[in-house]
Amino acid sequence: MTNDHPHGTRPGQHPFRAVLWDIDGTLLLSEDMHFRALRHALATEGVEVPDEFHHEIVGQAAKVVYEKCRQTFGLSMSFDQWRRLKYSYYTAHAAEIAARPGAPEAWRLFEQAGLRQALVSNSDRIVVNANIRVLGLETPGFVSVSINDVVRGKPDPEPYERAATLLGLKPQQCIAIEDSPTGAQAALKAGTHIIAWPEDLTLEFPPRIQPITDLEPALKDLLRYSA
C-alpha cells in the first residue's frame, strides 16, 4: 500500500467512498488460466511458451502481450486471430477459476463498511464479463471497466479515472487494490490510495508503494477510520 496515511483524517472519518478492484490475480486466481490460454493460442503455430515468460506479461494489456509474443516467438497469426484463440479457451474454462483466498472476505468487509465496489481490468470485455460471472457479481448497475472502455489501458491512469467517474467520485475518494506494478502505476497516477497485494513477491513496484502479503491487517488499518 502507499506509505502515507490519508491526509487530514482522524478516527471517526475517512475520505474513502469506493474500492476499485483489479481482477486477474487480485480477486481471482486467473493468471494461470490466462497463461494456459496463451499457450493454447501459440501452440497452433507450434510454439512452446516457457514458464518464465509469464513474469514478463503479468498485468499487461492484450495488445502489449501479443506484441511481446510476436517479437519473442515470431508469430505469423494476426492479433485478432490470436485474441480469438486465447479468449475462446479462457471463456470455455473460466468456471475452473477460483477466488483468491482472502478476497471474498475483503469484499464482504468493504460491503459492511458501506463502500461501493467496482472492477478495473486491463482485460477485454469478454474476459471481464466471464470473470464477473465467476464472481457472481452480475447485478444491475454494477460498474466495471475493461480495456475496451478506455483509449489507454494500465499503466495509464485512464481506467481508474473512468471507474471513479462512473461512480460519481474522484479518484482520491477511492482505494485501488492491485497485484501488478502495471496496475499500481495506473492507480498511483490517477491519485487513488493503493493497496499492492501481489501473488509474486519478486515483482518490482514503484518506490512509493509498499507491497503487502496479508490483506486483512491493511484493510483493518484503513477501515478503523469508520465513516
Image: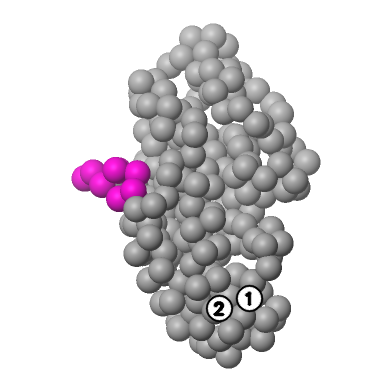
Marks 2 and 1, the one that precedes in the sequence: 2
Work out whether 170 lies above or below 153. above
Q: Is residue 83 magenta?
A: no
Which residues are the magenta region? 132-140
Left or right? Give the position of 179 relative to 90. right
Q: Residue at x 46, y 14 (%)?
A: 226
Give the crowd class for mark 2: few <14, some 14-19, many >=20 residues within 10 Å. many
Residue 97 spot, x, y in % from top left: 42, 50
In front here: 20 or 97?
97
Left or right? Give the position of 180 relative to 173. right
Residue 91 spot, x, y in % from top left: 36, 63
Q: Mark 2 or 1, which is nearer the eye? A: 1
How many numbered circles does the render carry? 2
Give the crowd class for mark 1: few <14, some 14-19, many >=20 residues within 10 Å. few
In front here: 186 or 165?
186
The kind of residue tagged 1 is Glu
- Give the secondary structure at mark 2: helix
In front here: 173 or 121?
121
Q: Which mark is residue 48?
A: 1
Q: Which residue is mark 2?
A: 42
What is the quadrant of residue 187 in the picture? top right
Query: Contact, CB < 8 Å: mark 2 with mark 1?
Result: yes
